[in-house]
Image (cartoon, helix red, strand yellow):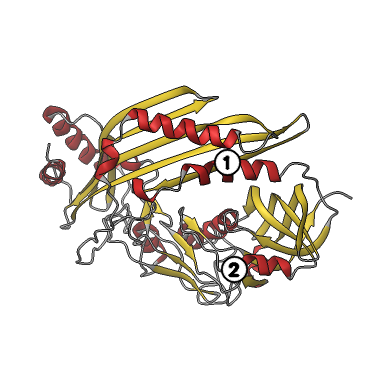
Amino acid sequence: MDYKLLAENIVKRALKYGADEAEVYLENGRMFELSVRNGDVENVKQAASKGLGLRVYKENKPGFSYTSDFSEQSLEEFTKKTVQLSLVADPQPWNALPDFKEGKIQDLDLYDPYISEIESEKKIKIAKEVERISLAYDKRITKTGGGSFRDTEIETIIVNSKGVSYSSKSTGISFGVGVIAGEGSDMQSGYWDSSKRHFKNLDTIENVANKAAKEAVEKLGARPVETQKAPVVFDRYSAGAFWWGILGAMNGDRVYKKTTFLTDYLNKPVASELITISDDPTIPGHISSVPFDGEGNITRKNILIDKGILKMFIYDTITARKAGVKVNTMAQRFRGYRTLPSAYFLNIVVQNGNMNRERIISEIKNGFYVKGIRGAGTDATTGNFSSGASGFWIENGEIAFPVDGVTLGGNALDMLENIDVVANDLDIREDINSPSFKIAEVTIGGKG
């Protein structure tokens, strides 16, 4: 079936039934996933799915519905009813499709045809092998959380009555393992995975297995420290949880409603001059890159914070119109075709620093190297930061012992402004990517 042609015809039908504007967001894909435990295949799941969401506007009144039934009769009735929904909605002046800029979507190298050719036996072998190596890493590894393998293929199409007609094919492939070290009251978990668009770019089975096992073993004997204020180094892989809270406070709808502590900080300093943050979903081959966003806008790199200065908030088209601002928008559909687009980042990259992480640690007399964050993080309304944390205590420039059962607390703006060193260890592997960084002083809540 020509799904783009199908989408174009549904848009035409919606206009025929009275819509002023219409948009179809269509997905067609398949997924495979399996898990193994103690060398045995535990679960195998394979599924194909397709569906489309239809959004219409009639006199600034919205209508939206979705379906997975692509039969001719069903789509005819579906389109008619979606337009009818808009007739009973309340009109708002901002209700309309985006105003699109002319352009051509980029080829971001997101599709690997080899993934569909991988035999199930090879996938099972990878999941079993990563578990086996991880369990054999150290005699203190006592339990397995299981090995896993997953791959996906999806075609995404967006067509609307304003001339947009885009399609993109992408793949994803990942495998990982979780293990538990220790026994009784001293048990620690470790997990690691590798997730890429192309099979050839996956990490080795040995590296993934050993990283998961090492994480579990090195945390054994973790204990809290005394409550105090001390320098804190956020590891590059724990830093994403810190930035996630800050990004939530940059949401345009929160700004419009004045429910974020960053409301009045546009074009003002909010962080150390060492901090530059971009949203860049145009990195070729990256797992979070996309050629167009959830509204059909061609993606581009946007600078959110430039050398500590807040340069833009995160808006979709509707929230930007409500707020009366003209800004590059960015939007996702969190449940694909089943949901409307909403303001959200696509791929965050915190700019790399120029100092080796080990050197940063070596210059700390007494401090905390954070490897894991749990809990709420930054309160978007107040800016208060509070989160459980684990990692390692630093004494005289060296890792002294593992730490757990402590909390980090403070004011997010103070923490941002007190970032005094950024490491050069950026690893772009997720949707929030950051180098390690040091905050000069943070309140650490522990024992006593």
For image coordinates 76% across by 68% down, the residue present is 364
Name the spot of residue 347 as percent of width and height, x first.
42, 58
Looking at marks 2 and 1 on the same chain, the residue that comes earlier in the sequence is marked by 1
Give the residue at mark 2: 423
**Badge 2 element:** loop
Q: Which amino acid lies under the numbered mark 2 shown in the image of this protein?
A: Ala
- Residue 430 appears at what percent x and percent y? 46, 53
Report x, y in % for residue 266: 51, 73
Callout 1 crowding tier (Cα within 10 Å): few <14, some 14–19, many ≥20: many
Image position of 91 with respect to 231: above or below:
above
- Label 1 SS: strand
Q: The N terminus is located in which quarter?
A: top left
- Position of 253 with respect to 316 (left or right) is right
Measured in 3D between alpha carbons, the distance from the residue under mark 2 to the one under mark 1, in whole angstroms, is: 23 Å
Task: Please tell me in which quadrant of the rendered image residue 271 appears.
Answer: bottom right
Q: Please give the count of numbered marks on the rendered protein.
A: 2
> Any mark on residue 191, and which?
1
Identified at 36% across, 28% down, the residue is: 121
